[in-house]
Amino acid sequence: MTDKRPTPTDNLVRAWASPDAITLRAATTGDGNTMFGHFAVFDRFTEISSWFEGNFLERIAPGAFKDTFKARGDQIRVLYDHGADPQIGNKPLGVPDVLREDATGAYYEVGLFDSSYVNDLKPAIRSGQLGASFRLKVTGEEWVTPREATRENPQKLDERTITSVDLYEFGPVTFPAYPDASAGMRSRTDEFLEHFLSDPLFVARFKERAGPVVVDRLSASIPVSTTSFGTSATTYTSAAPTVITQHFKLDPDADKVTIGRAIEEARQAYLKDRTETADGGSEEKDAPTERTEDSITDETADGGEAESIERRKAWHKQSTADFDAYLATTQGVLNVH
C-alpha cells in the first residue's frame, strides 16, 4: 500500500446517481422547501476513466468528509451544475443546514431559497430527474496495486481509497450517471474541464468563486493537446506558453481561451487561403471554409448531391489535419500529444 501516485488531486468532480441522491421534502411532512440526500457514498468502488485523471478504481472511505464539514461548512456552496448553467450560473440554491456523515455517506439538508431560478428546478428535483455532484480536493489517499483480478476489479487496475477531502461545492446535476447506467458514482472532471476550456463565461464565474490563483493552477495542470482544433478551446498549458504566445503575437499572460481563439483564427485563415489559391477546377476551390464539419453536413452543395457533400467534408477533414501538422511542425518545441 502506498500513500500517493502521480495523479491529479485538486478540482476533481464526482457525481452520484441514485434515488436518494437528491430529494425534496414534501409539504405534507415538512416545509416542502428542503432538499436533502447523499451526494457521496462510502466504500463503493467506481472506475475512473478520464483523459485528465487516468484509469483506476476509486472509493471514498468513511471519515473522508468529517474534517472538511467541520472546518469549511460555512464556505461550502450549493450550486446547480457547478455554475455551468447559463441562466443560474454562480447563484446559490440555498444554505446547507445539515452536513454530516452517516453509515451511507455524505448527508446534507439544504433550505432552498424562495427565488424564481430555484423554483424552476423544483419539479425536476421532485420527479427524481436530477442527481448530485460535488467538487473536491483529495487531501488524503491510499493506493493499492492488486496482484490478482477480482470480480469488482477484473482488470487489476490500481485502487485508490480517498481518506480525506476538502469539499468546495455540491448540488444537483442533470446527467450524473453514465448513459448505460441508472445509478452509481462516476467522475465528471472531464466535463468540468471541457466547460473550463470552451466557455469564457464559465471561466469568469469559476474565477469569481475560486479566485485567479486556483484558475491559473488548474490551467497549468491540463495536458497539452491539439485534439481541440475547430473550437475556441484549443488547449495549451505551461508546457510551452512562450512559444505559443510569441508565434501568435499574444500577450505573455494570455489565458487559454485567448490562445485557443488565436490558434483557431489561424486555422480558419489557413483554410481560407488554401481555398482561394486553389486551381479553378479543383475540389479545394469548391470546398467550404465553415468552422465545423457539422455545418457542412447541413448545407446544400452542388445541387445537394450527397457525393459532393462527402467530398467537401473530406476536404475539410484533410485540411484540418494538414493544419494540425503544420502547427506541430512550426512549434517543434511543443510536446504535443
Image (cartoon, rainbow, N blue to C red):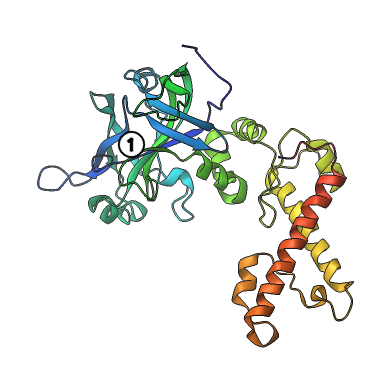
* Residue 95, x across and y down, in percent: 33, 36
Return the residue nearer the eye: 253 or 156.
156
> Is 164 displayed left or right of 220 in the figure?
left
Residue 15 vertical placement versus 124 (above, below): above
Q: Within the image, what quadrant is residue 243 found in?
A: top right
Residue bearing mark 1: 95
> Which of the image's four quarters has the C terminus?
top right
Residue 284 vertical placement versus 86 (above, below): below
> Is 315 displayed left or right of 173 in the figure?
right
The residue at 31%/26% (across/down) is 42
* Residue 266, x across and y down, in percent: 80, 57
Residue 321 vertical placement versus 284 (above, below): above
> Is 13 displayed left or right of 16 in the figure?
right
* Residue 64, x across and y down, in percent: 37, 20
Residue found at the far left of this picture: 28
Residue found at the far bottom of this picture: 303
The residue at 54%/44% (across/down) is 205
* Residue 186, x across and y down, in percent: 41, 38
The residue at 86%/42% (across/down) is 246
Return the residue nearer the eye: 95 or 252.
252
Q: Secondary structure at mark 1?
A: strand
- Give neighbour class at mark 1: few <14, some 14-19, many 20+ (Cα, 10 Å): some
What amino acid type should be assigned to the residue bearing mark 1?
Val
Residue 221 vertical placement versus 112 (above, below): above
